[in-house]
Image (tube, grey):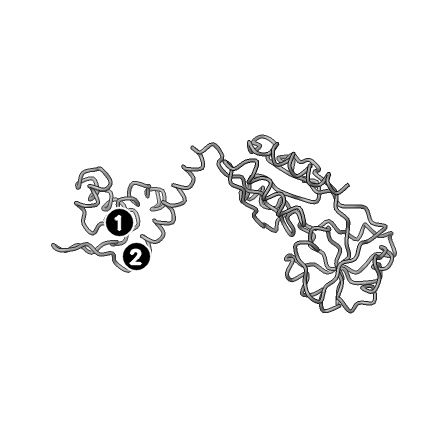
Amino acid sequence: MDGADSVDLRQLRCLVAIVDEGTFTDAAAVLGVSQAAVSRNLASLEQALGVRLLRRTSREVTPTSTGLRVVAHARRVLGEVDDLVREAVSGHAQVRIGYAWAALGRHTLPFQRGWSAAHPETELHLVRVNSASAGLAEGSCDLAVVRRAPDDRRFESAVVGLERRLCAMAADDPLARRRSVRLADIGGRTLLVDRRTGTTTPQLWPEGDRPVVEETHDVDDWLTVIATGRCVGMTAESTANQYPRPGVVYRPVRDAEPIAVRLAWWRDDPHPAAQAVLELLSALYRGDR
């Protein structure tokens, strides 16, 4: 058994209490255990890690340089465990909704305010995670806003609305003078895409008229390159609402299919707030009609 396997939370709590209180006696009083138990836990921790964590004299107890680092890590670990326990016993007092590039565009603020008014007991957090599942697979969120159907069978999803497909281009691009563009206008250009999370592929164009494709994995980089005029981009309407950028303009692509906005969740463990989120988002997008 290695050191990590033999470290437990009681040992970490004893170490932090000793450092905070200054003596083994005071640490024992705070923790509600005997001084002998505090000493045993510290000795077990030092043995498991193979390092001295505290300097003990007749007057004081101070951490070694290694001890200072271990105490800092111990505080973070204990804090995360406390957060985990609070969330587990609170009955899902929060809901985290992930998204990759853009959240809900112009519906983002109405959604946040509408949720707070209707569900004050459940705190809402929007989390940006640039992955195919917008953080769902990574455990970073409970629900996810995605713009293509998940291909992972562990997830279920439902369409909440549709968004126009827009072309992003430099402000001085000749196409920027138009009110809208067609797919054929973009076919001979270099298209900047995010294959992991994006909704645009060369298959939108007929074979023989497809744009050259370059890749990026970050919306800020995407906008920075497009502003130079070297590439154009294709994106959902929400991106234009959430990321206005000097030097970049967005124009509707009038012959491109709209993009479906979906809410995704774990098939075998949906968050209790999933249905309420689904209903509110669907109502907001219905207002576009």
Give the numbered dot on residue 46: 1
Tell me the distance, in whole angstroms, between the alpha carbons under discs 1 and 2. Answer: 13 Å
Q: Amino acid at mark 1?
A: Glu
Residue at (18% x, 38% y) in the render: 34
For residue 170, side relative to residue 154 (left or right): right
Residue located at (22% from left, 49% from top): 21
Residue, far left: 58
In percent of width and height, residue 135 lies at: 58, 45
- Horizontally, residue 273 falls left or right of residue 17, namely right
Residue 276 position in % (x across, y down): 60, 33
Q: Position of residue 22 (x, y in %)?
A: 20, 52
Residue neighbourhood size for the residue with mark 2, other residues' Cα within 10 Å, grouped as few (<14), some (14–19), many (≥20): some
Instruction: From the viewer's perspective, tell me whether residue 81 is left or right of residue 138.
Output: left
Residue at x-position 73% and y-position 53%: 235
Does residue 130 lie above or below 89 as drawn?
below
Q: How many marks?
A: 2
Whole-percent x, y for residue 265 in the image: 61, 36
Element at label 1: helix
Q: Quadrant of the C terminus?
A: top right
Where 248 sits versus 21, above or below? below
How packed is label 1: few (under 14 Cα within 10 Å), some, or many (20 or more)? some
